[in-house]
Amino acid sequence: MKIDTFKTEEWMNKYEKYAKYDMTCTCVNSFSLEELFKLTETDLSDFLKTTLDYGDITGSDELKRLISGLYLNKTPDNVTVTIGTIGANQLVYLSLLEKGDEVICVIPTYQQHYSVPKQLGAEVKLLKLKEELNWHIDFDELKNLITDKTKMIILNNPNNPTGSVMSYDELHELTAIADKYGIYVLCDEVYKGLNHYETDNKISIADIYDRGISTSSLSKTYSLAGIRVGYVVSNKAIIDEINHQRQYNTISVSRIDDYIACIALRNGDKIIKRNLKTILEGKKVLMEWINSRDDFSVVEPKAGTTAFLKYNFNMNSTEFSEQLFKDTSILFLPGEAFEFDKHLRIGYCGDIENLREGLNITSNWLDKNLKTAGIN
Ligand SMILES: Cc1ncc(COP(=O)(O)O)c(C=O)c1O
């Protein structure tokens, strides 16, 4: 079955490893095993006794217990463990969608959310978040897209690339609409837990809606993309249906990964504290840079690790990013890869000095090249 090119992944695979200033990364400084074990004061003797069989097929009891504890009124029966959020999303689509269904996918988002449903034969309607609403949904537009064939609404909250967070009221408005028509809501919550403001909404879709399906992982919030542990949380009937499908493509996740995920979740507060420190420092550097430029603007990101920068000069975002990369080894992600030109995604949560230096060099490059080319 043919599928569209995954534009962000193709871009990163092509350039990321050669970039001196990598502005595309969405993880907060990933842990080494050494740093993780030190921060969490882990005694390794038990770990070394791990038997390398398949382990519990849908995830160890302890892991599912820890994951269910991140949600309201959920038990391990409401959880299945997957290979990353990407595996979780894939299983949801394979389990619940079929040819002829309609889905509404809110963009900008991770491309999997519209290309896989399309590949499965669903009609995909894209609903754009509105920049003038600080990257939130226009609910009238959403209502206009619903028909009697709408099977699923697909969200990513907190949102990559914009860093917007749906409020409690917005989530309720959305689930009230979905409930009226019996529609599933899949919410990719891979940035859950990385809210920049204590007061912003932290509720998951699976907390408030029976047909709500939350997917997430340890990749971003816990800086452990290398263990490839993700999960789906939903009502028991949906989890059973997903497990039925899951037999064919997962068996189990690595026992080593399961073990490390448990360590991280038991120490979630410490890890999130570490990560938020870097996120807020990086955001400060970014906002100072934005304020120093009249050709760039941004809606302040409220969660996660990325922001979606808007520029006002007349150059296509892919061409711009390619030219900048060629001249300076600074890598942004072109907005075109998210179906929004004249934007760039920046991940601002890696090494802070590298970020500061990269942005300064970007400024020099812009001032020199755009003026010379008469673009500004
Ligand atoms: C919104 C979103 N969903 C899913 C993924 C995949 O993450 P994972 O490592 O959990 O598979 C990413 C990775 O960047 C993402 O940004």
Image (tube, helix red, strand yellow):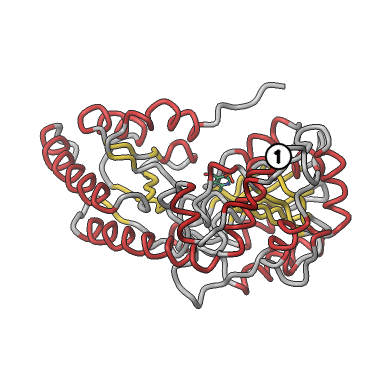
Badge 1 marks a residue whose secondary structure is helix
> Which residue: 25% across, 42% down?
313
Considering every residue shown, the one lying at the far top of the view is: 2
> Which residue: 38% across, 60% down?
279
Q: Which of 4 and 269 is in front in this view?
A: 269
- Horizontal side, residue 281 vs residue 268: left or right: left
Quadrant of the rendered image containing residue 14: top left
Q: Is mark 1 within 8 Å of ligand 1?
A: no
Crowding near pointer 1: few (<14 within 10 Å), some, many (20+)? Answer: some
- Horizontal side, residue 301 vs residue 295: left or right: right
Q: Is residue 193 above or below residue 197?
A: above
Quadrant hosting ligand 1: top right
- Horizontal side, residue 30 vs residue 126: left or right: left
* Residue 319 locus on image (x, y percent): 32, 30
* Residue 235 locus on image (x, y percent): 83, 60
> Which residue: 69% across, 43% down?
255
> Which residue: 16% across, 38% down?
365
* Residue 166 locus on image (x, y percent): 57, 65
Quadrant of the rendered image containing residue 42: bottom right
Q: In which quarter of the image is the N terminus?
A: top right
Q: In which quarter of the image is the C terminus?
A: top left
Q: Which of 212 and 44 is in front in this view?
A: 44
- Residue that numbered label 1 is attached to: 90
- Horizontal side, residue 68 vs residue 5: left or right: right
> Mark 1 belongs to which amino acid?
Gln
Q: In this view, does 333 lie above or below 63?
A: above
* Residue 238 locus on image (x, y percent): 84, 52
Q: Which of 38 and 215 is in front in this view?
A: 38
Considering every residue shown, the one lying at the far bottom of the view is: 199
What is the tally of numbered marks visible in this picture? Answer: 1
Q: In this view, does 48 lie above or below 70?
A: above
